[in-house]
Amino acid sequence: MPDMFSELKRIKADLKNGSSKELTQPVQRQVATVPGLPPVIPLRQSSNLALPSLRNRPVEVLPSSSSHKALRSGPLRAPESSIAQKPISSQSGLVAALGSPSRATSRPFASPPKHSQPAALVLQNPSREGNRSNGSVRSSGAPASPHGLRPSVPAQVAPTARAVATPPKIDSPRPAPSSFKRTEPVPSIFRPLPKGKPTRQGLFRLPEVWLGAGGKTQCVDDDHRGTVDVVIGLDFGTSFTKAAVGFRDKIFPVTWHGVSSSSPDYLLPSEYTQLEDGTVFVGQHPAARPDQICGDLKLPFINPGISSASVGAASSFVSLVLRYVRAWVYRHHAAKIGRAKIRWQLNLGAPSNGLESSPLIRTYRVLAATAWQRSLEVDPQRLAGSPSELWREGVQLQDLIDFQIRPEFVAQMAGYMQSPQRQRGLHALVDVGGGTLDVVTFIVHRVEDEDTFPFLVPQVHPLGTHGLIQNRLMGAEGMVGSGAVDELAPIESALNFARALGVDESRVIGRDTLFQSELRRVIKSVFDITKGRRYRLSDAWRTGVRTFFTGGGSQSDLYREALLTTRVPSVQGLQLMPLPPHKNLDEFSGGAHEYQRISVACGLAQDAFTLGRIVPAREVEDDTAIASTLRANRPDRDELYPK
């Protein structure tokens, strides 16, 4: 039997000699390329590869053991932009070329985030063909920390350490669009509501012959005996227009039976028709196409910024109204006027915060004056001038001695100011119109026998009945069926509204809830500001704030519920009360509810002195604390106890 130890020595020597020869010859292996990735140069295999020996030599990557035999045709040169083309002059150079080890291995065993890419430097165990000469598996340069980091040992790259090129970054897939849509807020800009076929053509009436007399400014042409002042109060509303005339200490609401069959007859829909031949009519002409019917005339005056075209279009309707009012006076009250020369006055209603905006007041003045000029046409189917020819300041208006823009709520208070219910102190008014919600706090008192109204907090918001309907349709425009939206009809419940238009009932209820929240926020803010700094010491915070709740939308349960559930800084809350009819009201058969609809027009049918003095909010100082004044004026001890 041969000596076992001698045989082992021989085998060891053969292995040693064979391994040395193999290592002295450079091994060139080809790396398989991945589609879309640049090729890289394999690391040259060496059992004693130290970092200083890599200076100015390209980095090479060995293939995995599974593809080692098939890829021996030689290294593939990487493009110049590859990392292998960077010369490595030191250990820091290697770090710079391959990336910071601390960055690449800061979380070696943490689960990578979704869609993230592997680190650029990957240290793997040596292949079985690599280092069996020493009988152990070495991974020089592998870390010696709990995860294998060993920063204190000189870095050596094992023959099978591989620098793996980073594949191109793959963008994370975008999540699929969710079926849940963000809730749209309550709209703050008015848009026209979807309309179908005209619904009020049955109310149309051809203008009668007597309406032509309205093109003149006098009941009789000559031989005047005396004068009479006639004041026109005009409430140009989003949905309906109301008018009244005041003269000889009486106020007469205007009825529209001469041009419309609307009911009640003191409400006129704010719309007109202009046919191709240039003729114009109040209301919806039966022969008119939908595009020839002009509505939504007041909406541009509510939105920020008003164009000249919008003023001109509105002036056509107001012209028809003014001509009708004059003709109505001549026909129904000629005996009261006699042969007196009429001196006309015109008061046009504006939002409660109108006096706070000079541009808005100027726009209303241009509207009123332009309409007066264009109404001077005796042909009841024509108007004078053109909508583009707007009135200019300083131009005289025939027989119109005065025209003013008055806040609507002051006109509404005219009946209250002359009624036994009148009280001095803090008051509030909540007016729900077709376009806006007006909320205003003010003080009622007299200065030198003149009624005075200091404004405290006037706010106007696009939360009228038009805004309510627009809010219900937010996001459901494509779901609306063939039914048209009639913005002049009474407000329906959410169930009836949804059924009429073919939209989801629960969605309408949700939009109504959001709308009510906005109503409460607006109302609460007005009272909070008033209590906080405008009129802190009012007794109304203890006894209850007298609040007038009026307007066409005040009969809607949605608005009433929102007002009653608003938390205001008053111990007794709000004392809701209707507007009492004006004591000079004549020839009106409606009840208290009907009067709420014409209260603005009736109040405007008075001259400026009767309406009282209006003090804009910007001219009213904040309430000041009395306590500081008392301390400042408190006498000292020597004054209280003189020696």
Image (tube, rainbow, N blue to C red):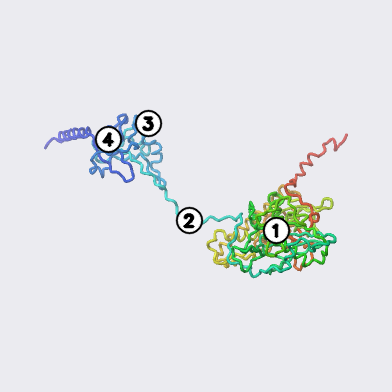
Residue placed under numbered mark 1 in the picture: 374
Q: Residue furthest front?
A: 222
Residue placed under numbered mark 3 in the picture: 92
- Of circles 1 and 2, which is in front? 1
Compare marks 4 and 2 and give the one earlier in the sequence: 4
Question: Disc 2, disc 3: CB below 8 Å?
Answer: no
Question: Disc 3, disc 4: CB below 8 Å?
Answer: no
Residue type at the position of mark 2:
Ser
Camera-side residue of 71 and 632: 71
The percent coordinates of residue 18 (x first, y second) are 19, 34
Residue placed under numbered mark 4 in the picture: 44
Compare marks 1 and 2 and give the one earlier in the sequence: 2
- Of circles 2 and 3, which is in front? 2
Camera-side residue of 448 and 296: 296
From the viewer's perspective, is 493 left or right of 345?
A: left
Residue 162, located in which quarter of the rendered image? top left
Query: How packed is label 2: few (under 14 Cα within 10 Å), some, or many (20 or more)?
Result: few
Label 3 – label 4 distance at C-alpha:
20 Å
Q: Residue furthest right?
A: 643
Query: How packed is label 3: few (under 14 Cα within 10 Å), some, or many (20 or more)?
Result: few
> From the image, which quarter does the C terminus lie in?
top right
Compare marks 4 and 1 and give the one earlier in the sequence: 4
Residue type at the position of mark 1:
Arg
The percent coordinates of residue 303 (x first, y second) are 63, 54
Question: Disc 4, disc 1: CB below 8 Å?
Answer: no
**Secondary structure of the residue carrying numbered label 2:** loop
Residue placed under numbered mark 2 in the picture: 178
Question: Disc 4, disc 2: CB below 8 Å?
Answer: no
